[in-house]
Image: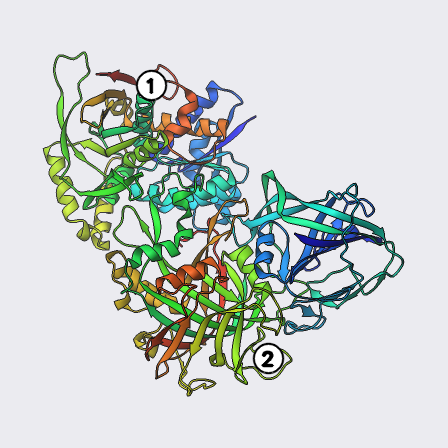
């Protein structure tokens, strides 16, 4: 049972709708505001909503919220609450929220600055059983449209009514609730502003989130997704990759087990009404060689200006991905086609990237800490590769541990569990030696001769051996295609494939360092299901200590490049 | 409400027959339909439109904006512009995007299989897509649908065989389609059991010439048997039959489609299949296309009236006992194509279904169980249920 504190007040004057997605509260207009803080154990959530009546609220519409429980954040986002991971600290009656944001000036995202603080929150429990609070949250569940996933989202209204009890109601005295709001462009909490608030009504008590009943709308609408960072036309600059080729051909029953790992791609075979009359194709893993890649995206930017952001704004992130090369095999052909990489497990350290990945791109992103060793301890890095508190960028090769984050705690490491330890030869850590510029257009360039992501010898099945393998080996470097399924968890909306292309610029650099590297895989109970499935391929489970795999020279690589992501629309002409 | 139906490829051989049929249908139901002719060649389209007193549009499929503009606001587009490998996917994608139902008379199996991937988008946009709404495969699909209704609730079947009598005179477009469709193997459907105990109808391939059978094309009242040899062919009829069987929740052991062939045609068919790799060479292909260009455009009116067609449907139970043995006499394939395509388009316009449909699904609201008539899409047809 969680406890809650809900405060409502009237805006004077009311705010007209701006339509700007970067201002989620003001976007559709607002004249009455509600802030609710929900707490259970060490987990907090703060929800900013518009409310129908300040003195007797019956209906809330959460426009933006923050949560420090990473799993709870994802679950409630799937239920239609636009929550974002954030560090939330509770000090007496002061609640402080820290989440990455774009400040007043164009440039890098701010990762450590305080975003908003609320003073005057009191959790109380009442004893009067007659005091009731029956509030609905009217939300929208969203997922990319199957036809135009790049530009349109399907939206279904849904009402949630959690059971509340032990209610205490009060009208606060003047200035009993105060806000400190950081000035930023995105996300912008306008019309909230720094200062004391008058005329606040407050309710507190307990809330049972597990029994929240849902009333979904029958009708699904299609709306344009002109959200900030919502149109998935991204540019990624200064991308660095540390990749490992994990050969699993000796694992017993590997084809079936890989099929299990990519099972979401074949939703059409089991889901009635998936839009395929008689399923006559399936996705299959093309090779038992799986890639484990650690990435740092130096600058993730919009391709074009999207007010209030400019193309000078950028954010960064670390990413750990498991990539499986898949192909579509039709019933009636002996050759697979449509080579693409599928990512069953992915970890990031930027909450906005997690949100977009899960909402729009079909990547089941989870929050993680990317740590380096300092003074004998694993210390998490900021998404831009610096220590919390500042300093120079730490080389990607110095990242030695990735741990799954149960809670978003900024620089702290509480509640984290290691999923991967990386051991590189000392001469590689921090070294920029060995990178070679690759000309993708030269047939006999070192790229053509290099063994990087996949090789011809990785393809051991007839359907994938010939033209498929040739195309895949060539194209997974030049501009690899990706295929995912959205929504990643149940949102009550139809599932669809999200396919896109990462087009790599001509600044690709490659290094295949000498010496052996090692990865130690761990499978903590708190790790997401997809990671645990992946670990099971290696016979690693939660009861065992981690399993180390050594990668000899040639089976691991380093890449640097810039790239753009384009999401396909299903009805584009592709035969031109 | 007036339903706008646009016919693309109106000036081709089949297109002109469909245009005439459209005129007949719209005159039979004044105010129900507004028929619009369209094609790439402005002069030809305009002349035909003037002749039939219809509106017309001129556009090609090189640039997406033109078909998008012209399909906006249309209820149904009928694509009669072959070769469909060049037109169907483009026109279908634009149609779905513009919320316009799509119907074509393609007989090309590879095109059919590419288009059915668009089902998911058609459902999302709540528009219908019907490929093979001409003689191939609407005729056999209608017959099979009718037979499976009769057999309900049987779920296990043996072989389902569809056989067509020979076509005496091909149109130039049909000949090109046959040439394009020539493969070393024939597509059939096999029922297979899956690991989880379920069943699936999967596409299978058999070498050309391996599947040949003798079919009896005679009427049940005839004293004389009319037994002819037919060879299995990769017809889209096999593909629609698979969908129709799945929709009726029946699980046949095999579905095969046959075309009657004399000795010379069988020899040419098997020889053609064996030289497919050579035929794919650009120079050979160009020579063949040149050769096809000297063929007549299609059968004359007299030939069409004289050259009726016969479709046979044989269905066996799991013990190989024949439980359906039907003979359906239809008008000439080109005339029947026009009747069926217009019927499918008008039914789609009226009922506004969504998703990928077989022609029989689109025609179901017509509710003509006898598949026989003096008027409507089945005029000139005669169903002979020989043993049921």
Subunit under mark 1: B
* Percent of width and height locating residue B324: 24, 21
Question: Does A254 sit left or right of A351 as displayed?
Answer: left
The answer to whether residue B331 is above or below residue A264 is: above
* Percent of width and height locating residue A13: 85, 54
Mark 2 and mark 1 residues within 8 Å of each other at the beta carbon: no
Q: Nearer the viewer, residue B23 or A505?
A: A505
Q: Residue at x 45, y 86 (%)?
A: A431
Residue indicated by mark 1: B371
* Pointer 1 local density, CA inside 10 Å: few below 14, some 14–19, many at least 20: many
Question: Does B381 sit left or right of A367 as displayed?
Answer: left
Q: Residue at x 38, y 65 (%)?
A: A540
Subunit under mark 2: A
Q: Nearer the viewer, residue B174 or B310?
A: B310
Residue B300 seen from this side: yes
> Which quadrant of the rendered structure holds the N terminus of chain B?
top right
The CA span between labels 2 and 1 is 78 Å
Q: Residue at x 27, y 49 (%)?
A: A333
Q: Nearer the viewer, mark 2 or mark 1?
A: 2
* Pointer 2 local density, CA inside 10 Å: few below 14, some 14–19, many at least 20: some
* Percent of width and height locating residue B275: 15, 49
Q: Residue furthest right?
A: A174
Both marks 2 and 1 on one chain: no
* Percent of width and height locating residue A380: 56, 75
Residue A344 seen from this side: no
Q: Residue at x 33, y 16 (%)?
A: B370
Question: Does A8 sit left or right of B180 as displayed?
Answer: right
Quarter assignment of residue B31: top right
Element marked by disc 1: loop
Residue indicated by mark 2: A387
Element marked by disc 2: loop
Q: Nearer the viewer, residue B28 or B20?
A: B28
């Amino acid at each position: 049972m969680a406890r809650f504190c809900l405060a409502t007040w009237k805006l004077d004057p009311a705010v007209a709708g701006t339509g700007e997605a970067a201002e989620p509260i003001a976007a559709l207009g607002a004249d009455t505001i509600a802030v609710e803080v929900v707490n259970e154990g060490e987990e907090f959530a703060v929800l900013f909503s518009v409310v129908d009546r300040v003195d007797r609220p019956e209906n809330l519409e959460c426009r933006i919220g923050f949560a420090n429980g990473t799993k709870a954040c994802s679950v409630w986002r799937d239920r239609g609450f636009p929550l974002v991971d954030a560090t939330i600290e509770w000090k007496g009656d002061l609640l402080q929220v820290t989440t990455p944001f774009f400040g007043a000036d164009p440039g890098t995202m701010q990762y450590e600055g305080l975003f908003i603080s609320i003073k005057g929150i009191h959790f109380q429990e009442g004893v009067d059983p007659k005091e009731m609070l029956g509030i609905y949250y009217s939300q929208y569940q969203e997922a990319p449209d199957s036809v135009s996933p790049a530009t349109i989202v399907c939206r279904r209204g849904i009402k949630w009514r959690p059971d509340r009890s032990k209610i205490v109601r009060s009208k606060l005295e003047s200035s009993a609730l105060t806000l400190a709001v950081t000035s930023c462009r995105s996300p912008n909490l306008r019309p909230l502003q720094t200062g004391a608030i008058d005329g606040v009504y407050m309710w507190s008590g307990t809330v049972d989130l597990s029994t929240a009943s849902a009333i979904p709308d029958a009708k699904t609408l299609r709306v344009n997704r002109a959200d900030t960072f919502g149109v998935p036309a991204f540019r990624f600059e200064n991308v660095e990759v540390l990749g490992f080729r994990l050969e699993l051909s000796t694992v017993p029953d590997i084809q079936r087990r890989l099929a299990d790992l990519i099972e979401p791609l074949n939703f059409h075979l089991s889901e009635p009404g998936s839009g395929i009359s008689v399923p006559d194709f399936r996705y299959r893993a093309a090779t038992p060689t799986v890639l484990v890649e650690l990435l740092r995206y130096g600058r993730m930017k919009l391709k074009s200006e999207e007010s209030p952001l400019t193309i000078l704004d950028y954010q960064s992130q670390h990413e750990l991905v498991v990539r499986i090369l898949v192909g579509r095999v039709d019933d009636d052909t002996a050759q697979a086609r449509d080579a693409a990489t599928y990512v069953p497990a992915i970890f990031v350290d930027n909450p906005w990237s997690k949100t977009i990945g899960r909402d729009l791109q079909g990547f089941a992103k989870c929050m993680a800490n990317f740590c380096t060793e300092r003074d004998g301890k694993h210390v998490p890095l900021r998404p831009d590769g610096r220590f919390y508190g500042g300093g120079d960028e730490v080389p990607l090769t110095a990242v030695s541990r990735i741990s799954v984050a149960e809670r978003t705690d900024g620089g702290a490491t509480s509640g984290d569990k290691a999923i991967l330890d990386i051991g590189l030869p000392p001469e590689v850590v921090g070294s920029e030696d060995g990178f070679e510029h690759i000309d993708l257009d030269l047939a006999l360039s070192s790229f053509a001769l290099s063994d990087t992501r996949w090789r011809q010898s990785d393809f051991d099945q007839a359907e994938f051996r010939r033209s498929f393998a040739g195309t895949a080996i060539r194209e997974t470097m030049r501009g690899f295609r990706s295929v995912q399924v959205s929504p990643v968890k149940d949102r009550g909306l139809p599932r669809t494939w999200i396919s896109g292309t990462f087009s790599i610029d001509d600044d690709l650099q490659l290094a295949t360092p000498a010496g052996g590297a090692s990865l130690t895989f761990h499978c903590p109970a708190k790790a997401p299901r997809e990671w645990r499935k992946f670990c099971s391929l290696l016979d690693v489970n939660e009861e065992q200590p981690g399993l180390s795999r050594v990668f000899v020279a040639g089976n691991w690589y380093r890449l640097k490049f810039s790239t753009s992501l384009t999401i396909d629309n299903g009805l584009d002409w592709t035969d031109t | 409400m007036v339903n706008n139906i646009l016919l693309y490829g109106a000036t081709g051989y089949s297109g002109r027959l469909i245009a005439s049929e459209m005129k007949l249908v719209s005159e039979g139901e004044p105010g129900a339909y507004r028929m619009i002719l369209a094609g790439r060649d402005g002069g030809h389209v305009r002349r035909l439109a003037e002749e039939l007193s219809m509106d017309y549009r001129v556009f090609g499929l090189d640039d997406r904006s033109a078909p998008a503009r012209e399909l906006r606001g249309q209820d149904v587009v009928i694509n009669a512009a072959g070769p469909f490998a060049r037109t169907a996917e483009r026109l279908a994608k634009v149609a779905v995007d513009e919320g316009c139902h799509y119907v074509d008379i393609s007989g090309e199996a590879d095109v059919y299989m590419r288009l059915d991937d668009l089902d998911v988008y058609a459902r999302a946009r709540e528009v219908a897509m019907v490929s093979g709404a001409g003689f191939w495969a609407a005729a056999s699909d209608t017959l099979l649908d009718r037979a499976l209704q009769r057999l309900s609730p049987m779920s296990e079947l043996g072989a389902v065989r569809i056989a067509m009598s020979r076509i005496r005179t091909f149109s130039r477009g049909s000949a090109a389609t046959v040439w394009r469709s020539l493969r070393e193997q024939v597509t059939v459907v096999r029922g297979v059991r899956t690991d989880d105990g379920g069943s699936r109808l999967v596409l299978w391939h058999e070498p050309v010439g391996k599947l040949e059978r003798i079919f009896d094309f005679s009427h049940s009242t005839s004293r004389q048997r009319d037994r002819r040899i037919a060879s299995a062919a990769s017809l889209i009829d096999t593909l629609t039959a698979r969908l129709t069987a799945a929709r009726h929740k029946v699980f046949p052991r095999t579905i095969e489609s046959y075309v009657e062939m004399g000795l010379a045609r069988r020899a040419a068919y098997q020889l053609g299949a064996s030289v497919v790799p050579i035929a794919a060479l650009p120079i050979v292909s160009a020579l063949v296309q040149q050769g096809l260009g000297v063929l007549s455009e299609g059968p004359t009116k007299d030939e069409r009236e004289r050259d009726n067609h016969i479709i046979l449907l044989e269905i066996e139970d799991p013990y190989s006992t024949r439980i359906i043995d039907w003979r359906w006499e239809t008008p000439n394939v080109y005339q029947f194509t026009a009747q069926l395509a217009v019927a499918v388009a008008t039914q789609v316009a009226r009922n506004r279904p969504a998703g990928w449909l077989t022609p029989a699904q689109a025609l179901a609201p017509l509710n003509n169980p006898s598949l026989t008539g003096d008027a409507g899409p089945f005029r000139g047809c005669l169903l002979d249920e020989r043993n049921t």
